[in-house]
Image (tube, grey):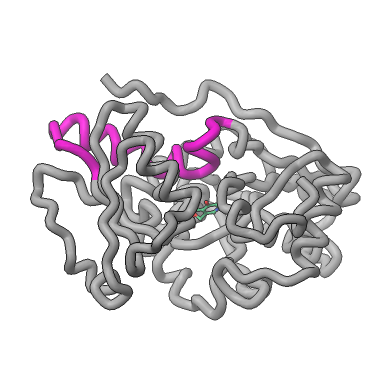
Amino acid sequence: MLTIALPSSIPVQQVSAFYQADVSILRADTVHPAISGNKWFKLYYYLQQAIRLKKKGIVTFGGAWSNHIAATAAACAAAGLKCAGIIRGEEPVACSATLQQAKELGMQLQFVSRQDYKEKAAVDFNNEWLLVPEGGYGTDGMLGAAHILDYIPHYTHYCCAAGTGTTLAGMIHSAGEGQTITGISVLKNNHSLGQAVSSLWRQPPKAAWHISHDFHFGGYARYTKALTDFMNRFYTATGIPSDFVYTGKLFFAVLQLLQQGYFPAGSRIAILHSGGLQGNASLPKGVLTF
Ligand SMILES: *Cc1c(COP(=O)(O)O)cnc(C)c1O
């Protein structure tokens, strides 16, 4: 039996005073110290499948500060599955905090060159292992993420950060007519994201959806002082910590979109806090006040 189930409830925090609009945040960052935010949802069906098919464990992919690697290591430890991480780049002299923790949780790490990683060639694992694509991208990841809206139904607009787009696709999949889902892409000029999202469904969704490419702050895992200043200000005003790769950009984007009149009058907006706070450990000390 799977020892991790989906969370029984997730806190919803009103941030209407900060945004000067009807805005709430689903605090999925609080559900588990290591399997944070959207990652629990995206991994849920992969873990179930690994157990049902009696796989030895899970093999997946990521970079040195990957939230997906951190979450997979913790989720497999909780579910009693072995796991291995194929890590992009040469083995460093000192592992990142993320990889250190993944190792302590029992994840077997294998470092591959960026070229091999691209080709995903250096995989020694046979089909006794379940292969989970990078970021959990795939139908199972999407269907897991579709459960997120169960915790926060009845809003007119939902916003989330998008990397692979798996979470965004899941939220769109479970939303209904009259609801709009907006994904904030954290990669620069990733204009194939819309295709990546829509290829995860068999049927067109009932909800409206949209991707903004305007809030990447220079690209994936890039940041500016304007972003970190905003994150500090947001924390002071709301008590909500954000990460510089995904949710800081998301919370910033919602403020800008409101100021641009993107949301029609009377909108009730829900933002997914998809977690990822562990990645802030890669920042120089003192950049963030929390
Ligand atoms: C992984 C991650 C995302 C991106 O999710 P996708 O499903 O790949 O789009 C968003 N936010 C946080 C905090 C993440 O760790």
Q: Residue at x 52, y 21 (%)?
A: 8
95 or 118, which lies in front? 95
User: Seen in the image, is 2 located left or right of residue 236?
Assistant: left
Q: Is residue 210 above or below residue 16?
A: below
Q: Residue at x 65, y 37 (%)?
A: 27
Q: Would you say residue 108 is visible in this rendering? A: yes
User: Seen in the image, is 36 located left or right of residue 283?
Assistant: left
237 or 203, which lies in front? 237
| Location of residue 133 in the rendering, given as x and y in whole percent from the top left corner | 30, 56
Q: Which region shows up in magenta?
A: 31-58
Which of the image's four quarters has the C terminus?
Answer: top right
Q: Residue at x 34, y 31 (%)?
A: 77
207 or 80, which lies in front? 80
User: Seen in the image, is 271 located left or right of residue 66?
Assistant: right
| Location of residue 56 in the rendering, given as x and y in whole percent from the top left corner | 15, 36
Displayed quadrant of residue 161: bottom right
On whether residue 243 falls in the magenta region, the answer is no
Q: Is residue 51 above or below residue 275?
A: above
User: Seen in the image, is 136 located left or right of residue 108?
Assistant: right
- Residue, far front: 93
Q: Is residue 67 above or below residue 198?
A: above
Q: How many marks?
A: 0
On whether residue 54 falls in the magenta region, the answer is yes
| Location of residue 172 in the rendering, given as x and y in whole percent from the top left corner | 51, 52
Q: Residue at x 80, y 39 (%)?
A: 239
| Location of residue 213 in the rendering, given as x and y in whole percent from the top left corner | 61, 73
Which of the image's four quarters has the N terminus?
Answer: top left
